[in-house]
Amino acid sequence: MSKVIRDVRRVLELVGIEDGATISFHHHLRDGDSCLLMIMDAIAEMGVKELVLAPSSLTNAHERLVDYIRDGTISKIYTSGLRGRLGRAISEGIMDTPVVIRSHGGRARAIESGDVNIDVAFVAVSEADEEGNANGLRGRNAFGSLGYALVDVRYAKKVVLITDNLKPFPLDTISIPQYLVDYVLVVDSIGDNSKIATGTTRLTRNPLDLRIAHYSAEVIANSGYLAPNFSFQTGASGAALATAMFVRDRMLEKGIKGNFVLGGITSYMVQMLEEGLFSVAFDVQSFDAAVTSSILKNHNHIEIDASFYANPRNKGCLVNRLDVVVLGAMEIDTDFNVNVLTGFNGVLQGASGGHEDTAFGSKLTVVVAPSFRMRIPTVKDRVSTVVTPGRDVDVFVTERGIAVNPRREELFDRLLKAGLPVMDMHSLKKKVESITGVPSPVTFGDKTVAIVEYRDGSVIDEVKQVA
Amino acid sequence: MRLRRSMLYVPGNSPSMIQNAHIYGADSILLDLEDSVPLEEKDAARELVRMALSYLNFEDVEVTVRINPLDTAFGVDDLHAVALPMLDAVRLPKASCPEDVKRLSDLLTEIEEENGLERGRIHIHPMIETAVGVENAFLIARASERVDAITIGGQDLTADMGVVKTEEGVELLYPRMRVVMAAKAAGIDALDTVYADVNDAEGLKKEALMVKRLGFTGKAAIHPNQIGVINGVFSPSEEEVEEALRIVKASLLASKEGKGVVVVDGKMVDLPVVKRAKRILMLAGVDFDV
């Protein structure tokens, strides 16, 4: 019997979705994904209830899930992030069971350890053959690495590929091999890959971000870690991405060649790879559809799965080899704990992502953020939600000053000697509050709406309902 | 002596830009009440800049305000609003003759007295942007003790000359040289006009290098992203700093030993050369008194 199915309803009947089943998706198409809702619409129509939704993350493309929570189709969610109307509704308490937030490494761990048992993994691919060999690299909706889904396909009981680009057997580029695949669902469109690179993943011209990036690169250059063979990752915020530009200048100036770049790979990282500034790019997620051609033609641009990337419980993940990571923050506190999940109003509007994974693994963790946003200071006495513990954060860089974790006294001295505006976190907080004043704290209700799991499976924090 | 390589223009009607004006590494900021503020916002901008000068902390950055010309309906009111302790200098647009500067200086003296400020503390930066102004540059530079820098305004000046501002800048060569010479003769700084294409870092660098060769000590920036390039061009190179250090050390040694003649690398060094070396060290942030 052929694996190729052209009807959504038919494939759902074949895999046998039942009440309470756990289903998974990936978010490589980010805001351009249309597979998750396509499947959910069909499941809801079948009247299946109390599903556990376990995607690698949820984006602005998934706001309509609110309706399926309200009507009982979905009763539980595991994800890395929540945004927009969905994040708002969950913060307001529409779910009876709290959402479980996991990092990318933590999710891989949970799946491999059996904490999460996926019944059916629905995997959007941009190219597949009729046996179920597939990749995300070719086709009109190519999106690059399949990193997050590569864990799901190995552990899910059933695997359904979704593609808008069926090719004759065999493909010459195979990220997912046929022996893991039950069905290939052929649809008109898996989404719109032009929506992968949103504002947050493009290089910024914003002078404030560039100023922060300049400082952040100076921190790296004077930290002692910018040395031959160093390894590097940046998060997806404007200032974090822009740091790479200034780090590149310093590498060229000093004639330094690095070892590898890791994580979400942008076209700028590809450029540095092609210039020979790094030997290898390990790509768990391509932040730009343009990156896909590089994976296809460049042997040193390697697609990796999320476990290889950051699972703390396998036999060795790549984040542990990182020298320097630059990450963003919504809030940071005087103990250097970082919140990348809830906004200034306490509402879920971010993602754990690889934040705590890379902060743990790297030798130097630099967190960058404007010192205040819309009159709200970034530095708090206590962040509303801890995602990354302060013990893993070394330096916090803003446009108005740089705070060094007291655990890294030697780093403070180095940066001071380099003429950088270093200070302790309390002074930085005071400095910002002299401009903004001290905002009154957000008031939360008693109900827990999300549990934030640390990468090892322990609970690091809880998110309460907004009042 | 004050470091004045880059001067960032900030529209006086933009609270968010004013609030962050000093963080980009500019040596000076220029809060503008003149050309970047539309007519209907003149009053609001004046009040905003007054509040900024009263309550914000711009740290070590030199704070200047470009007022509207004194012969407009706004100039005098601007001056009364912004002559506050935090203000380092007033930029006077369209300065065409020494009397323009003297009038501003006299007004400042009155306001300083009224407000109990130290007399003569607020400096004046006349902006040369008319043909008459170019011809009077030296007289303008010497018109008041308060003048410690003069600047050239390329847009208005080329308009007054009836020519177009070009990439190579031949039309501004004479005015630039005249303004530089006036500044040198008066012993003050000379600041060059803005480079309008904010996305062309190469073009900006080329123009900055050119005006540095003419003798300008700094250049205005119209966007924060231009400051790094400008500071880079107007900062001395490592070789220049090393040479300057040798000269200053030799001169300190000579005066200690009571010798009148300073010798560096086997060559006699004149006093102006020592002075120039000290300026280079100042620009490089090297402490040479110890």
Image (cartoon, rainbow, N blue to C red):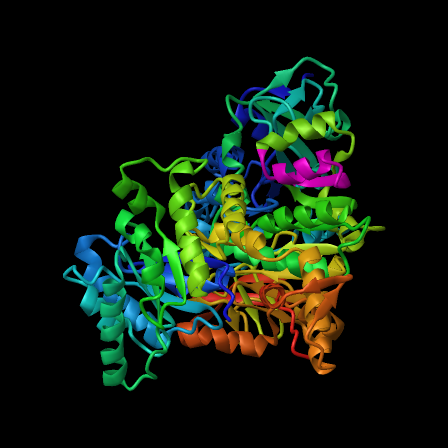
The residue nearer to you, when weighing A176 against A271, is A271
Q: How many numbered discs sit on the rendered protein?
A: 0
Residue A345, given in percent of the width and then of the height, sits at 42, 64
Position of the C terminus of chain A, as image quadrant, is bottom left
**Residue A435 coordinates in the image, percent (x, y):** 41, 73
Quadrant where the N terminus of chain A sits is: top right
Q: On screen, A423 above or below B217?
A: below
**Percent of width and height locating residue A299:** 78, 30
Looking at the image, residue A297 lies above or below residue A54: above
Residue at 65% from the left image edge and 55% from the top image edge: B237
| Quarter of the rendering containing residue A297 | top right
Q: Can residue A398 be seen in this view?
A: yes
Start and end of the magenta stretch?
A: A267-288
Residue A18 within the magenta-colored segment of the rendering: no
A143 left or right of B177? right
Quadrant hosting residue B65: bottom left
Query: In the image, is residue A274 part of the stretch drawn in magenta?
Result: yes
Give A109 or B160, whichever is nearer the viewer. Answer: B160
Percent of width and height locating residue A5: 60, 20
Which residue occupies 42% across, 64% down?
B186
On screen, residue B269 versus residue A435, left or right, reads: right
Of the pair B185 and A97, the residue shown nearer to us: B185
The correct choice, above or below, for B258 with respect to A227 in the image is below
Q: In which quadrant of the rendered view does residue A172 lie?
A: top right
Looking at the image, the residue that sits furthest to the bottom is B116
Please tell me which residue is depicted at 39% across the width and 65% down the height of the picture.
B19
Q: Farthest residue in the left direction?
A: B73
Furthest-top residue in view?
A168
Work out which residue is located at the far front of the displayed protein and give it.
B260
Residue at (53%, 37%) from the top-left corner? A196
